[in-house]
Amino acid sequence: MREATALRERAEFDVPHESEAVIVGYRANGSLSLYFGPDPCFHFDSDMRLRRAYVDGELYRTQGTTFARLRRDRSNSCVELQRHELSQVELTQIFEQVHERLRRLVHSFAESAVNCVQEIPADGQIQKRLKSDLKIIMSRPLCLAPAINCRR
């Protein structure tokens, strides 16, 4: 929570079915990040389209129409970024994981089983905003954000 300073609004929640705290937050541009401990984490753009994810130790990034898994291959002389564009089957599996994790979180909120441990700023608004955004995400098939432009 202390390290998530890029998230202007953020909160830590104790959720019954999670072994670690769930950290959620919003950047200045309105994009949403959800951390279920260090893994998994999901990042959405301001239109609640999936932008990035970290699942089972793997980093994923939107390519606009699909996700790519990114791996850093390190040698003594350089670091090379390897990209693998997901097949439709792999993309469907990632989407199912995201939806299931978010579905359980939505259910916990609906059951009033979530405890807000801390919130910055402490105005009590992030939970309301999060519930609204989760409703948007869960009301439609997952959408991918436009491709992330990277410097070459």
Image (cartoon, rainbow, N blue to C red):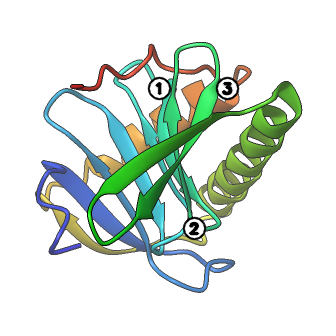
SS under mark 1: loop
Q: Residue at x 64, y 22 (%)?
A: 66
**Residue farthest front in this picture:** 77
Query: Residues under labels 2 and 3: Cα distance?
Result: 21 Å
In the figure, is residue 125 to the left or right of 140?
Answer: left
Mark 3 neighbour density, 10 Å: few (under 14) some (14–19) many (20 or more):
some
Q: Position of residue 56 (x, y in %)?
A: 65, 66
Question: Label 3: which residue?
Answer: 142
Residue toward you, 67 or 111: 67
Q: Amino acid at mark 3?
A: Leu
In the figure, is residue 152 to the left or right of 117?
Answer: left
Mark 1 neighbour density, 10 Å: few (under 14) some (14–19) many (20 or more):
many
Q: Amino acid at mark 2?
A: Gly
Query: Residues under labels 1 and 2: Cα distance?
Result: 23 Å
Q: Residue at x 15, y 75 (%)?
A: 2
Discs 1/2, front: 2
SS under mark 3: loop
